[in-house]
Amino acid sequence: MKRFKFTISGNNYEVEIKKFDNAKARIEVNGTCYNVELHKQEQTTKTPILVRSKVKTPKGSHVIQKSESGGYRVIAPLPGNILQVLVKEGDSVKKDDKLLIYEAMKMENKLLAEKDGVVKSIKVGPGDSVLQDDVLIELEIN
């Protein structure tokens, strides 16, 4: 069946497992046959320890930086597909106006403007796939 080589206390042994049923085995050790019983299986595997190098962070990276443009970014709340864009660049929008329709989790969702403003840029089009937190539309706040 299977052959193994063992070294125990400096002595070398060649072991061949001839037959194995349930907890009983017929083995041959250096040419001599033995019938043995398996009492307990020991596990000798250890969980590996992952060692990572320290992450370097630039000085001042912990400070939140505000955008100077006075703009507002509309982001995707869930991953999905854009079905329809309802605004164009330069359009004025009011709070709660529909901006676009997208499919997420097999449901159609309408994305509404959270603030009044003017559409500065549209980053997606119909048929585009988006991930969560992708920028969809940028608004210039009035």
Image (tube, rainbow, N blue to C red):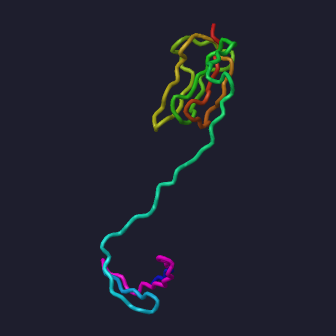
**Residue at x 35%, y 83% (from the top left corner):** 25
**Could you tell me residue 36's position as x and y percent?**
33, 82
Kindly give the residue lying farthest to the front in the view shown: 9
Residue 27: which quarter of the image?
Answer: bottom left
Question: Does the magenta stretch mainly form a helix, a strand or a loop?
Answer: strand
Q: Is residue 87 left or right of residue 111?
A: right
**Residue at x 47%, y 82% (from the top left corner):** 2
**Could you tell me residue 29's position as x and y percent?**
43, 87
Placement of 52 over or under 46, stated as above or below: above
Mark count: 0
Placement of 66 over or under 79, stated as above or below: above
Kindly give the residue lying farthest to the top in the view shown: 142
Q: Quadrant of the C terminus?
A: top right
**Could you tell me residue 58's position as x and y percent?**
69, 27
**Could you tell me residue 116's position as x and y percent?**
58, 10
139 and 6: which one is in front? 6
Magenta run includes residue 5 = no
Magenta run includes residue 8 = yes
Magenta highlight range: 6-23
**Residue at x 54%, y 19% (from the top left corner):** 98
Residue 67: which quarter of the image?
Answer: top right
Q: Quadrant of the N terminus?
A: bottom left
**Residue at x 59%, y 37% (from the top left corner):** 129
